[in-house]
Image (cartoon, rainbow, N blue to C red):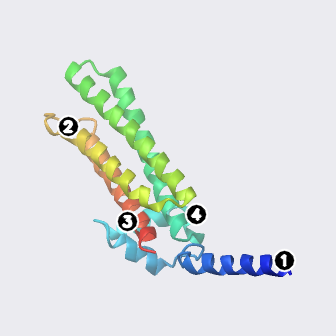
Amino acid sequence: MAIFSTSLVFILISIIFISITPLSIGQKLTDTEIKHLCSKTSNLEGCYKLLKSDPRIANVDARGLVEVSVDLASNKANKTHSLFNSFINTTHDSRLKNIYKKCSSNYNDVIRDLKVIKNSLQSGAYKIIHVQVKDAFEEIKQCKKLFGGASSDRTHIKKKTQEFEFLLSIVDITSGNLNKK
């Protein structure tokens, strides 16, 4: 009798877990669903093309889409961070060197935020993701402020920052989709 009741409890727990798990977790997202999420960004076509350029996108669920967007943002953040570090070493203008150092530090924090997002995604702690995205946006905002007063942007940092913000907005929108489930 004990085996029967243990099996029954296990089956009931499984049914409850399955019923509360978001439907799109585990279910492949359609192009229409991806386009709908991208329509919430400032550039639907750019978002869609960017996501579709990643071969993993063909078989992702909602969580996988967030993972892809986090990876894309992380790659951009790492490249921009490296760029700042190289500028620190090559510029002779002390004011610009200081700006590059501060922005490098900001991007270092953004990279940390993206790692926390990825870990939260893997553990299912979706509510934390929004906080980390907000923190990352704030770090980028601080860097943009520093460049706001720069007379020229020969290094095209403003453009790179806008590109990164766009990627971060995709992370925000795709992860927000998980929180609604």
* Amino acid at the residue labelled 1: Ala
Residue shown at the point (39%, 51%) measured from the top left: 132
The nearer-to-camera label among 3 and 1 is: 1
Question: Do labels 3 and 1 touch, CB within 8 Å?
Answer: no
Which is nearer the N-term, disc 4 or disc 3?
4
Residue shown at the point (34%, 47%) measured from the top left: 136
Indicate the secondary structure of the residue bearing disc 2.
Answer: helix
Label 3 Cα neighbours within 10 Å, binned few <14 / some 14-19 / many ≥20: many
* Residue receiving disc 2: 147
Indicate the secondary structure of the residue bearing disc 4.
Answer: helix
Which is nearer the N-term, disc 4 or disc 1?
1
Which is nearer the N-term, disc 3 or disc 2?
2
Indicate the secondary structure of the residue bearing disc 1.
Answer: helix
Residue shown at the point (41%, 59%) measured from the top left: 171
Quick check: 49 above or below 152?
Answer: below
* Amino acid at the residue labelled 4: Arg
Query: Residues under labels 4 and 3: Cα distance?
Result: 18 Å
Question: Do labels 4 and 3 touch, CB within 8 Å?
Answer: no
* Amino acid at the residue labelled 2: Phe
Quick check: 44 above or below 146?
Answer: below
* Residue receiving disc 4: 56
Residue closest to the far front: 1
Location of residue 126 in the rendering, given as x and y in whole percent from the top left corner: 47, 61
